[in-house]
Image: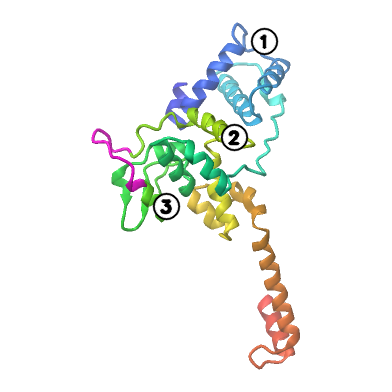
Amino acid sequence: MTWSRAHKKSAKTDGYWMKRLTVCFAGKTLAEITPEVVEGFKLKLAENRSKATVNRHLALLRHLFNRAIRRGYAGRNPVSAIGLFREENSRSRWLTTAEEGDLFKIIPEPYRAFCRVALYTGCRRSELLAARWDLIDWERGVLMLPTSKSGKPRPVELSSVVLQTLQQVPRRLDTPMIFPDCRKVSHRFPAWVREAKLPGAVTLHTLRHTFASRLVMAGVDLLTVKDLGGWGDLTMVQRYAHLAPAHRREAVEALARGERLQRSGTQSGTSADDVQSASLVSVR
């Protein structure tokens, strides 16, 4: 874990997974951890954990074996012979405005303010817990996050809803943090979801999915959504593309209107031949 703490932002989570690996493989030598044993661990863990969580455990175990091999272990990495679960990330749960209202009526302060800011900025839990009052530019409506998932600072645009919410959050004199009392929000969130009787798998991260989904449904392009949410890769926001069928329809209809315009030959007094020639030139 020394290497993980020095090189990874997820070192704390790795610690939880390491404890489970230690319990499951206690008493076994490296040679005794065969592909069959790893496969059994994978299937057993999948009985009460998500496919993504199982895959993270396997990735950590694979990393441990690779480090052992680099240090002289002569055996093979058993995880390399095991296939990971296919993670279904193509569709993500998001909240309707009615569900948002039902949920937020139940969440107490200061967690309610935390969750509202999370939903309307798309910020991750770790980012909001690290947010400080002195990094808010109230005039420009921008919060500069000191750290993000990429490890670099990034600006976050604050809407009027977020600014109003932040103005109502009491400031503590003993800390510069905006939400110092919300570290247990992930643990308490499931109880609020159950009380609100929301269907489906709703987690704290659903607020981030809601942020992106509503932007796409409002016609915002995916590149802008990526920038606003701080995603490092455009492929990460492709899962939301299906939420904008009307936007895609408008795009193909624009092409159709251009074709009809060429056929009519009435563009600024030009003939159909002139329009067609210009179109061929532009395509070349």
Residue 134 or 4: which is nearer the viewer?
134
Q: Relative to residue 284, is residue 134 drawn left or right?
A: left
What residue is rendered at 37% in x and 53% in y? 142
Query: Looking at the image, is 23 positioned above or below residue 163?
Result: above
Magenta-drawn segment: 166-177
Circle 3 sits in a helix, a strand or a loop, which is it?
helix
Q: Quadrant of residue 201?
A: top right
Q: Specify the quadrant that holds the C terminus.
A: bottom right
Q: Residue furthest top?
A: 27
Residue 50, image x, y percentages: 64, 28
Circle 2 sits in a helix, a strand or a loop, which is it?
loop
Residue 27 or 213: which is nearer the viewer?
213
What amino acid is found at the position of numbered circle 3 in the picture?
Val
Residue matched to label 2? 197
Q: Is residue 34 visible?
A: yes
Query: Looking at the image, is 62 positioned above or below residue 146?
Result: above
Query: Are the residues at dot 3 and dot 1 in contact (C-beta closer than 8 Å)?
Result: no
Query: Are the residues at dot 1 and dot 2 in contact (C-beta closer than 8 Å)?
Result: no
Can you tell which mark lies on residue 161? 3
